């Protein structure tokens, strides 16, 4: 075992031991919809009470409208983000559907090619004996013709050679 690797590993472990992470919770300052609706209704009731009592509630009314505007703008930002995300997801779905259609087409082509090959194999298996017999007959005819041709060309009998070759062509 290498001492250099061991020291390197121990140094890394020492550095990793010193790492400290702090978790931070991301919170929405406006709260949930139900809580915000309850807050709005509570503030409206306070507003009505302050209107009935006079001008004492004017300062409170201004702070309420600022809080409501902040929450409304937060909801609008969330809605915009959600709409953007929805359009991105719709685009992804469209692309995935196109990929699926392409794959289905390729699968159908492969199935058709496989069926064609299976049919050809079945045909050759059924006709194997007959095809071999025909092939052997052709080969034996060619051997006979070549033998006769060689014999006649060796003995220099061109007239006979032409007659024999003419006879074999007629078969």
Image (cartoon, grey):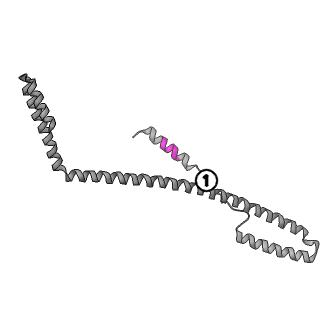
Q: Residue at x 10, y 29 (%)?
A: 149
Expressed as whole percent of the image width and height from the top left, the position of residue 64 reads: 83, 67
Q: Residue at x 13, y 31 (%)?
A: 165
Up-down relation of residue 33 to residue 143 (above or below)? below
Q: Crowding near pointer 1: few (<14 within 10 Å), some, many (20+)?
A: few
Expressed as whole percent of the image width and height from the top left, the position of residue 103 reads: 45, 53
Q: Residue at x 48, y 55 (%)?
A: 101
Q: Quadrant of residue 76?
A: bottom right
Expressed as whole percent of the image width and height from the top left, the position of residue 166 reads: 14, 32
Residue tagged by mark 1? 21
Q: Is residue 40 left or right of residue 98?
A: right
| Secondary element at tag 1 | loop
Secondary structure that dominates the magenta span: helix
Location of the N terminus by quadrant is top left
Q: Is residue 10 magenta?
A: yes
- Given residues 140 and 90, the one toward you in this image is 140
Range drawn in magenta: 8-13
Up-down relation of residue 44 to residue 82 (above or below)? below
Q: Residue furthest right?
A: 55
Q: Is residue 8 left or right of residue 30?
A: left
């Amino acid at each position: 075992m290498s001492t250099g690797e061991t020291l390197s590993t121990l140094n890394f472990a020492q550095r990793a031991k010193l790492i400290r992470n702090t978790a931070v919770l991301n919170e929405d300052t406006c709260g949930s919809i139900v809580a915000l609706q309850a807050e709005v209704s509570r503030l409206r009731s306070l507003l009505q009470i302050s209107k009935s009592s006079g001008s004492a509630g004017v300062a409170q009314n201004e702070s309420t409208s600022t809080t409501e505007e902040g929450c409304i703008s937060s909801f609008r930002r969330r809605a915009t983000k959600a709409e953007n995300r929805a359009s991105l997801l719709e685009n992804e779905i469209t692309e995935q559907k196109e990929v699926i259609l392409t794959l289905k087409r390729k699968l159908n082509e492969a199935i058709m090619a496989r069926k064609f090959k299976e049919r050809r194999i079945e045909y050759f298996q059924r006709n194997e004996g007959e095809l071999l017999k025909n092939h052997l007959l052709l080969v034996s005819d060619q051997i006979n013709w070549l033998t006769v041709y060689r014999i006649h060309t060796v003995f220099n009998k061109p007239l006979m050679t032409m007659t024999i070759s003419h006879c074999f062509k007629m078969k």
